[in-house]
């Protein structure tokens, strides 16, 4: 997918164009606290609120104002940033405050599904709230530093108006007016991450009976897996081309993971992570595509049985 807006990696703290913006941050967990800290350090007037007391103390010491209620926080900000536990908690906190939010811009960076993002955008539109949905591709310690990025979709006007401020958190990528696109991209990227992590843990479990620590295994797995990410673009070209017979590919028959499954079983460990991939491979082989390339397992996923 190509972005409709600019991708700006400027995290220098320059917030020109947003100097007069007052910001309210609702939710001060590890991520919400990191977002608020970046705003305060950049000189924005920042009001913070958290359901449980005490979370705002460090931010107040930096210069933030702690609001006694969520309503107080909302009424204090032109831009309201919500980083709560889940979709239900967003509605629980914001539904009673729809009138106070009317005319303001709401940036929701709570992890939600695409369907939930669309529902929140529709709710905001009915209430006269400008809505921008965000997916944070970083851990809290990365906010404002190298490698941090946040994906946005929803109001184009809101994104471009507040982009200098949003850039304080990381590279800002805009995917268009459909509010669900940032969430979809966010969850798709996380899907790849979690499957990779499961593969690492599968390998660590396999070597553990031989006396190999997870730390030792990680020292070999990290450079190996990093090198293998170079194959993404090659697989992407095959998938987009729709021809799994092009030369130079490793065939599905050669990719059979039976030996890995047998080795895991012999070590007395579970093989669920590898068995999942083997199932995708076998589905295509059984359908008569064994001589075609490994990338064809994409079809097992795209068209589930």
Image (cartoon, rainbow, N blue to C red):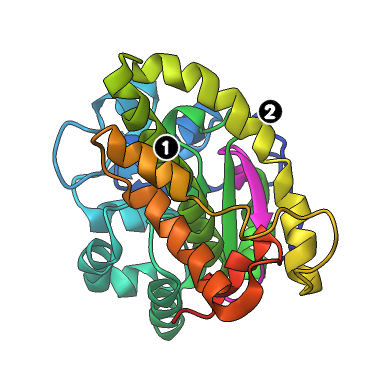
* Upstream in sequence: badge 1 or badge 2: 2
Q: Residue 270 in the image: x percent, y percent? A: 26, 43
Q: In the structure shown, which secondary structural element does the residue marked by tag 2 occupy?
A: loop
Q: Which mark is residue 36?
A: 1
Expressed as whole percent of the image width and height from the top left, the position of residue 278 reads 46, 58
Tell me where residue 30 sits by quadrant: top left
Query: In terms of depth relative to the viewer, which is nearer, 177 or 217?
Result: 217
The relative height of residue 263 versus residue 175 in the rendered view (above or below) is: above
Q: Which residue is drawn at 46% across and 81% down?
A: 125
Looking at the rendered structure, the secondary structure element under dot 1 is helix
Residue 218 locus on image (x, y percent)? 46, 22
Residue ID for mark 2: 12
The image quadrant of residue 247 is: bottom right
Q: Nearer the viewer, residue 305 or 240?
A: 305
| Disc number placed over residue 91 in the picture, else none | none
Q: Where is residue 109 in the image (x, y as percent from the top left)?
A: 43, 55
């Amino acid at each position: 997918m190509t972005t409709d807006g600019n991708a700006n990696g400027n995290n220098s703290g320059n917030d020109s164009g947003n100097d007069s913006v007052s910001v309210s941050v609702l939710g001060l967990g590890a991520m919400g606290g990191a977002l608020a800290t970046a705003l305060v350090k950049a000189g924005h007037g920042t009001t913070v609120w958290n359901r449980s007391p005490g979370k705002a103390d460090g931010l107040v010491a930096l210069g933030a104002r702690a609001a006694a209620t969520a309503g107080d926080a909302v009424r204090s900000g032109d831009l309201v940033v919500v980083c709560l536990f889940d979709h239900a908690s967003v509605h629980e906190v914001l539904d009673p405050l729809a009138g106070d939010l009317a005319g303001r811009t709401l940036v929701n960076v709570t992890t939600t599904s695409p369907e939930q993002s669309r529902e929140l955008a529709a709710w905001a539109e009915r209430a006269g709230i400008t809505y921008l949905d965000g997916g944070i591709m970083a851990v809290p310690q990365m906010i404002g530093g190298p490698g941090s990025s946040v994906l946005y979709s929803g109001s184009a006007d809101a994104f471009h108006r507040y982009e200098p401020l949003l850039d304080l958190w990381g590279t800002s990528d805009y995917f268009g007016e459909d509010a669900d696109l940032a969430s979809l991209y966010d969850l798709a990227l996380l899907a790849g991450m979690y499957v990779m992590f499961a593969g690492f843990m599968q390998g660590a479990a396999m070597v553990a009976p031989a006396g190999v620590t997870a730390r030792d295994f990680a020292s070999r797995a990290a450079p190996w897996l990093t090198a293998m990410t170079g194959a993404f673009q090659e697989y992407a070209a095959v998938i987009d081309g729709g021809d799994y017979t092009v030369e130079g590919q490793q065939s599905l028959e050669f990719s059979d993971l039976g030996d890995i499954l047998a080795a895991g079983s012999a070590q007395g460990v579970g093989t669920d992570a590898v068995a999942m991939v083997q199932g995708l491979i076998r589905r295509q082989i059984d359908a008569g595509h064994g001589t075609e390339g490994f990338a064809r397992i994409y079809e097992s996923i795209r068209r589930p049985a």
